[in-house]
Image (cartoon, rainbow, N blue to C red):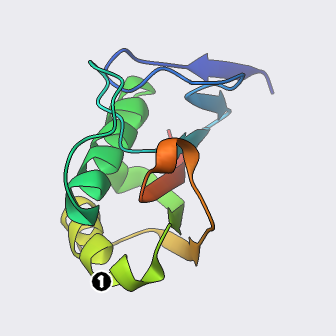
Amino acid sequence: MAKEVVSTANAPAAIGPYSQAIRVGNLLFVSGQIPLDPVTGDIVAGDIRAQTRQVLTNLSAIVEAAGSSLARVAKTTVYLRDLGEFAAMNDVYAEFFGKQPPARATVQVARLPRDAAVEIDVIAEV
């Protein structure tokens, strides 16, 4: 199967040698997104809730650019700077994924790019 690069101006451009997403067959592998405003390129102001909301908005734009949606996400990985913020992140996450959320792993990490509080990547069906 050929791989296809997926990108959109509605999400932050890659800040390194990687693609926003890669489609292989009916699977979409979306690179980890941090809470960057796609227009300014800056981390959004606010707490973990605001940052999580921006991350999920960015992820939604990328999966939609591939012809899919968050409803078709099968797996996520959430990287948190502070696992003490899990409950607040989880509240926002639930708003985006509804009654049939994807499988998920959540881990605390020492540091994220641009000192973000959260990063999330996804695998979705297209």
Q: Which element carries disc 1, helix, strand or loop?
A: helix
Q: Depth check: 19 or 16 in front?
A: 16
**Residue 76 drawn at (x, y percent):** 52, 62
Tell me which corner region of the image, top left, top right, bottom left or bottom right, holds residue 71.
bottom left
Residue placed most toward the observer, 64 or 95:
95
Front residue of 71 and 114: 114
* Side of 92 relative to 13 (left or right): left
Give neighbour class at mark 1: few <14, some 14-19, many 20+ (Cα, 10 Å): few
Q: Quadrant of the N terminus?
A: top right
Amino acid type, callout 1 = Ala
- The location of residue 34, given as percent across then percent down, is 44, 44
Decide: is 108 above or below 72: below
Residue 28's spot in the image, x, y percent?
A: 58, 39
Residue at position x 19%, y 53% in the image: 46
Is residue 7 placed above or below 126 in the rendered structure? above
On the image, which quarter does residue 43 sit in?
A: top left
Q: From where the camera sits, is residue 50 visible?
A: yes
Residue under numbered circle 1 = 87
The answer, for residue 125, to whether it is visible in the render is no
Residue at 50% of width from left, 41% of height from top? 114
